[in-house]
Image (spheres, rainbow, N blue to C red):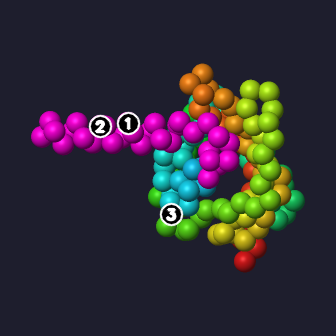
Amino acid sequence: MKYKVGILSVLVMLFTAAVRAESDPQNFFQNYTRLGDDFNPMVAELYDDSAKIHAYRVYPHGLERNMEFTGAQWKELVKKVMPLAKLQNDNSTFSDIKISEIEGGYKLKANRYSKRKCYTDTGYYMILKKQENGSLAILEEYMETKPLPNC
């Protein structure tokens, strides 16, 4: 029994290290999208606890709502809603990806297409911060969302 627990612990540590160890922004984003496409809750581990997540939503009747989460709050939310997202096939594809170097990290801008709700978010961006160990983490993310599908 100790042998099985030991192997599982090593596998978890290796997977967690693989998620966190990416230092190239393009590879980091590919990992981010792969985890999202797989509905893997480990995608939450790519966020810095102090990150700022901004979600802007416009409702059909004109109401606008800005929502903001910390990285720690977002991690908990992602872990809770990932099973529902998988059931609804609620994920995104990204196009027109542009990465620029900024002080202390990178800014990634892209068009984010919601497969479930059939709309494109042209304002999407994320800021990646270099960690002390050389890896990257999401420090800020902005997305525009819609409550109802366009399809």
Count of numbered tags: 3
Q: Nearer the viewer, residue 86 or 98?
A: 98
The answer to whether 89 is drawn above or below residue 64 in the figure is below
Tell me whether circle 1 and circle 2 mark residues in contact (CB < 8 Å): yes
Task: Farthest residue to the bottom: give it.
Answer: 151
Q: Which mark is residue 13?
A: 1
- Residue 140 falls in which quadrant of the image? top right
What kind of secondary structure does the magenta stretch mostly adopt?
helix
* Quadrant position of the N terminus in the picture: top left
Whole-number angstrom distance, CA of label 3 to CA of label 1: 25 Å
Q: Which residue: 62% across, 47% down? A: 27
What SS does tag 3 mark? helix
Task: Farthest residue to the right: give it.
Answer: 62
**Which residues are drawn in magenta?**
1-30
Q: Which residue: 84% across, 63% down? A: 61
Please state which of the two labelled residues, at mark 3 or mark 2, is closer to the viewer.
Answer: 2
Residue 129 in picture, x, y percent from top left: 68, 31
Among numbered discs 3 and 1, the one appearing first in the sequence: 1
**Residue highlighted by disc 2:** 9
The three-letter code of the residue at mark 2 reads Ser
Among numbered discs 3 and 2, the one appearing first in the sequence: 2
What SS does tag 2 mark? helix
**Residue highlighted by disc 3:** 86
Q: Nearer the viewer, residue 39 or 82?
A: 39
- Residue 54 falls in which quadrant of the image? top right
Residue 111 in picture, x, y percent from top left: 78, 59
The three-letter code of the residue at mark 1 reads Met
